[in-house]
Image: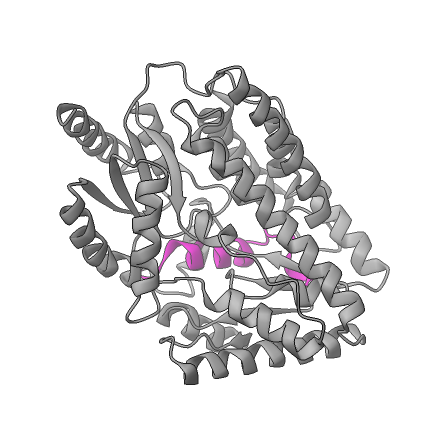
């Protein structure tokens, strides 16, 4: 299989060693983790082993798959006709140097890491997909899609009626794309179950993250992040089963007062901003090691991914497509201007999770979230909530500097009482 996929096995082994070492340091070093987290540990490691083999078999049987980069691509429609969406966002610094031979260095780490894996022949998913679907959430992505000839869904930059109509047309165009690829028609008989399944995935994540509102959360911020990272790669049905098992265990831990943390109650922080793809948890690790508790993630690998459900009530196919389009249009990406939805959602999260401080986790060159952090800070100042902005990449070179700043931020929160 690996030979037919065109993998550079030596380089792939180096990548996996790098990722395994970081995973052990960040996640496995935690004490008193929920037992069910073993399911998600396994999913992390399986992302380049068993999951690849599953998709390989799927393709050998005539199955179809697409690569995706963003949570705007509607999984429900792809799954309805048996097309498997494969997330391609890289979270490792190891392959970045390969991408720098073809792409500018001053673009975001997600693009550089992802294409570095492709150029280094260490990404097994390339040959397993029929094509890639990009989106227009930033200039760097748009130009990269152009460079490599990807298919693109146009995400509008405003949220007026004309923009909603445009987005609905894009969703229908995606439906047509999936029908052509699969040779199957999207019908209510296959779309409605797919909508219910993907909603169950989001509901399971919602339930898990509700426990983080407790004074003593039964799951750490690091482990909650891991669950939200692997959801994109796992088989949807398998993830739902694992997530519901974890939620049941968290319910039991909460009932018995079992905390994920070994220290006295500490300040509660929100991580806001750019996504943290699987393999990347540098800032979160530093934050929780500094004694802070991450109780909510306001990102595309967090609350933004699972917050809203698709309305399951429509009985007509056209209405179901509109419901899907409307759900994805509620995603409050920083590409929108004005982005009042995000500011309103953040205010609700601050209250619901009793947040003491906010840490903006911004990947380098992500100008949308970097600049929009100023608008968020205006709200935080009104509420008397301190914030810290960290602009970084996937490397470990600035870990010491970040640790110093986070520890100072933790002291500031403690001094405020």
Extreme residue in the right direction = 61
Residue 103: x %, y % from top left: 40, 65
Residue 55: x %, y % from top left: 74, 53
Residue 265: x %, y % from top left: 32, 19
Name the one closer to the observer, 1 or 413.
413
Name the one closer to the observer, 409 or 323.
323
Residue at (41% x, 19% y) in the render: 261
| Vertical relation: 40 (above or below) 64 | above
Residue 386 left/right relative to 35: left
Q: How many marks?
A: 0
Residue at (38% x, 34% y) in the render: 295
First to last magenta residue range: 106-129
Residue 141 left/right relative to 85: left
The quadrant where residue 312 appears: bottom right
Residue at (71% x, 76% y) in the render: 316
Residue 58 left/right relative to 52: right
The quadrant where residue 65 appears: bottom right
Extreme residue in the bottom direction = 162
| Vertical relation: 387 (above or below) 339 | above
Can residue 231 be seen here? no
Residue at (51% x, 55% y) in the render: 89
Q: Is residue 369 magenta?
A: no
The quadrant where residue 242 appears: top right
């Amino acid at each position: 299989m690996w030979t037919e996929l065109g993998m550079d096995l030596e380089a792939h082994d180096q990548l996996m060693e790098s990722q395994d070492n970081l995973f052990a340091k960040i996640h496995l070093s935690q004490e008193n983790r929920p037992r069910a987290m073993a399911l998600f540990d396994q999913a992390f490691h399986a992302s380049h082993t068993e999951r690849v083999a599953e998709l390989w078999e799927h393709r050998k049987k005539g199955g179809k798959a697409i690569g995706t980069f963003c949570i705007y691509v509607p999984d429900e429609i792809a799954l309805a006709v048996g097309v498997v969406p494969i997330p391609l966002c890289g979270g490792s610094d190891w392959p970045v140097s390969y991408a720098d031979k073809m792409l500018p260095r001053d673009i975001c780490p997600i693009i550089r890491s992802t294409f570095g894996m492709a150029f280094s022949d260490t990404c097994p998913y390339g040959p397993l997909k029929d094509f890639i679907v990009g989106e227009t959430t930033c200039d760097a992505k748009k130009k990269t899609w152009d460079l490599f000839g990807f298919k693109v869904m146009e995400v509008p930059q405003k949220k007026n009626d004309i923009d909603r109509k445009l987005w609905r047309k894009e969703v229908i165009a995606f439906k047509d794309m999936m029908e052509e690829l699969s040779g199957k028609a999207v019908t209510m008989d296959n779309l409605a179950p797919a909508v219910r399944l993907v909603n169950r995935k989001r509901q399971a994540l919602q339930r898990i993250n509700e426990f983080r509102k407790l004074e003593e959360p039964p799951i750490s911020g690091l482990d909650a992040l891991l669950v939200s990272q692997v959801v994109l790669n796992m088989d949807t049905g398998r993830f739902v089963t694992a997530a519901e098992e974890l939620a049941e265990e968290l319910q039991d831990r909460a009932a018995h007062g079992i905390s994920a943390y070994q220290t006295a109650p500490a300040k509660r922080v929100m991580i806001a901003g750019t996504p943290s793809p699987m393999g990347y948890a540098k800032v979160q690790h530093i934050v929780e090691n500094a004694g802070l508790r991450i109780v909510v993630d306001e990102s595309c690998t967090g609350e933004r991914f699972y917050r809203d459900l698709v309305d399951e009530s429509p009985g007509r196919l056209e209405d179901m497509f509109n419901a899907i389009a409307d759900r994805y249009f509620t995603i409050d990406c920083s590409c929108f201007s004005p982005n009042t939805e995000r500011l309103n959602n953040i205010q609700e999260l601050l209250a619901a999770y009793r947040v003491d401080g906010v840490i903006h986790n911004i990947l380098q060159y992500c100008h949308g979230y970097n600049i929009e952090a100023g608008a968020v800070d205006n709200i935080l100042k009104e509420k008397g909530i301190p914030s810290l902005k960290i602009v970084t990449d996937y490397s470990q070179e600035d870990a010491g500097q970040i640790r110093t700043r986070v520890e100072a931020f933790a002291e500031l929160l403690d001094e405020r009482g």
